[in-house]
């Protein structure tokens, strides 16, 4: 008789609070800087760009922050998400390692992004904001923000990296179906977009450029704010619901992970699954290895420099102390568009600097091989972004086989790839 494969929680067990790792960090990150004065950014200086409650969370060092009941009720559409023991993948790899994955692909938009989109839309709506702007790489974040805005009666403009806009047409249809307006970036809607197109009419865009356009529109339109799907502290905070659920589910399985693995673009899904487990190490109870899997085309944690840099290409955002490849870096047009961001974020970068996080850079061909093996064994076609986590997990499982060591590996399946089949077709 096969052992239990899937570990499920009840709706009543959805966490009631998010975990803020800032409360436990041994070294506090350097502050964000005002881009004009180059002095430490004050909370009030961010309120023209973000909802006040989100700014409060951005600067908070409070360990536990309550999840609003209205947000928690919406979480019940798809949460708790399953934790799954990947027996078939283990067998295919002939590894003594135990492999678990948290399946965030079951959300309505097919990825983890809805965890923070619902929270951000809620706080903006509560403040009386009527319009939001944002960027999106592969389209998962734009889709999540669109449905979240629909629930709270907000208008939304999404600047989608032009390469993905053309390469992944069904993503823009999903955004439109939920009510969002999607624009290929660089666009002619903003001063910055027009400037880029004038200098380079064939520019394929980048996340940094899309952020610049979204920020410009947010600060120039009335009663409008900007939302971000990764990098910033309040975004990572909301995503910790992933790891908090996984904690309870690993207990049900009678295990605690030796290694927690996730793909890494700006840090949202990586932080979401890993920070609650890191908490045990920071509190002095258990040891855990955290591995961020990056694309070789954009390896900011693996090969970047730890320094102050802008979060966008135009230099409109606060300066962030982070591992960066440079805000004007334009990576190769890989299929994992959600990982094509130049920087690593304030919290993750400090933890990497302090030795709490490891990173690896993986070539695109290896990630697609891993994705297809996962599809054949576990039955889920993963998003190109998520294949990086799978590839890193396979590496660790094979190391365990060589060492004859039974390790417990946990990775985050951040999204499915059913709208990314053109990329699989090209690889095959």
Image: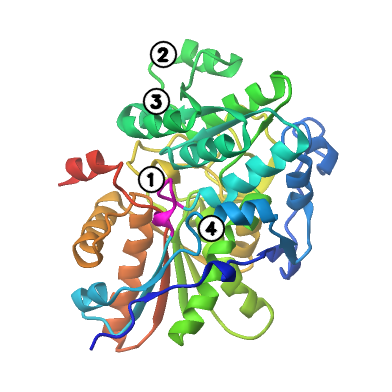
Pointers 4 and 3 in contact (CB under 8 A)?
A: no
Which residue is more in the foreground, 74 or 185?
74
Mark 1 or mark 3: name the one nearer the start of the chain: 3
Label 2 or label 1, whichever comes before in sequence order: 2
327 in relation to 378, above or below: above
Residue under label 2, please give it: 201
109 inside magenta stretch = yes
Measured Cα–Cα span from mark 1 to mark 3 = 16 Å
Q: Which is the main secondary structure of the residues drawn in magenta?
A: loop
Toward the viewer: 195 or 57? 57
Nearest to viewer (mark 4 / mark 1) = 4
Residue 19 placement, left or right of 400: right
Tell me the mark number nearer the camera, choosing from 4 and 2.
Answer: 4
Q: Position of residue 188 (x, y in %)?
A: 51, 13
Closest to the camera, between mark 1 and mark 3, is 3
- Residue under label 1, please give it: 297
Residue 76's label in the rendered image is 4
From mark 2 to mark 3, how far is it between C-alphas? 9 Å
Q: Residue 275 appears in which quarter of the rendering?
A: bottom right
Spatial distance from mark 4 to mark 3, Cα to Cα?
A: 38 Å
Name the residue at the top extreme: 198
Taking the spot 66% from the left edge, 51% from the top edge, the residue there is: 70
**In the drawing, what numbered circle is on residue 204?**
3
Image spot of residue 5 (x, y percent)? 33, 77
Residues rendered magenta in the picture? 104-111
Asked whether residue 400 appears in the rendered view, the answer is: yes
410 is within the stretch colored magenta: no
Quadrant of the rendering where the N terminus is positioned? bottom left
Identify the residue at horizontal 73%, vertical 20% (top origin): 222
Q: Position of residue 416 (x, y in %)?
A: 34, 52
């Amino acid at each position: 008789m096969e052992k239990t494969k899937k570990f499920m929680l009840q709706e009543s067990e959805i966490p009631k609070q998010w975990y803020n790792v800032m409360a436990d960090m041994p070294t506090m990150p350097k502050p964000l800087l005002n881009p004009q004065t180059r002095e430490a950014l004050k909370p009030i200086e961010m309120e023209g760009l973000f909802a006040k409650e989100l700014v409060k969370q951005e600067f908070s060092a409070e360990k536990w922050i309550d999840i609003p009941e209205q947000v928690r009720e919406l979480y019940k559409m798809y949460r708790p998400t399953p934790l799954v023991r990947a027996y078939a993948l283990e067998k295919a790899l002939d590894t003594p390692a135990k492999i678990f994955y948290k399946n965030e692909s079951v959300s309505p938009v097919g990825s983890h992004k809805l965890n923070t989109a619902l929270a951000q839309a809620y706080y903006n709506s509560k403040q009386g904001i009527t319009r939001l702007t944002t960027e999106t790489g592969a389209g998962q974040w734009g889709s999540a923000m669109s449905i979240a805005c629909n629930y709270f009666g907000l208008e939304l403009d999404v600047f989608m990296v032009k390469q993905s806009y053309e390469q992944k047409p069904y993503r823009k249809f999903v955004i439109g179906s939920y009510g969002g307006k999607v624009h290929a970036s660089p666009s002619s809607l903003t001063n910055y977009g027009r400037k880029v197109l004038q200098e380079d009419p064939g520019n394929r865009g980048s996340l940094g450029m899309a952020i610049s356009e979204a920020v410009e529109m947010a600060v120039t339109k009335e009663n409008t704010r900007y939302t971000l799907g990764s990098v910033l502290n309040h975004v990572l905070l909301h995503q910790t619901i992933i790891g908090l659920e996984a904690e309870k589910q690993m207990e049900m399985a009678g295990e605690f992970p030796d290694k927690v693995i996730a793909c890494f673009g700006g840090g949202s899904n990586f932080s979401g699954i890993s920070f609650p487990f890191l908490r045990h190490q920071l509190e002095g109870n258990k040891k855990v290895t955290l591995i961020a899997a990056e694309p070789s085309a954009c390896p900011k944690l693996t090969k970047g420099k730890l320094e102050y840099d802008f979060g966008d290409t135009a230099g409109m955002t606060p300066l962030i102390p982070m591992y960066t490849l440079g805000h004007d870096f334009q990576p190769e047009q890989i299929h994992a568009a959600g990982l094509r961001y130049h920087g690593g974020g304030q919290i993750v970068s400090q933890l990497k600097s302090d030795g709490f996080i490891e990173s690896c850079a993986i070539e695109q061909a290896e990630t697609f091989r891993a994705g297809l093996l996962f599809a054949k064994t576990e039955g889920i076609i993963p998003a190109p972004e998520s294949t990086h986590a799978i590839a890193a997990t396979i590496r660790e499982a094979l190391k365990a086989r060589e060492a004859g060591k039974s390790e417990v590996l946990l990775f985050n399946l951040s999204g499915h790839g059913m709208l990314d089949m053109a990329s699989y077709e090209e690889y095959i």
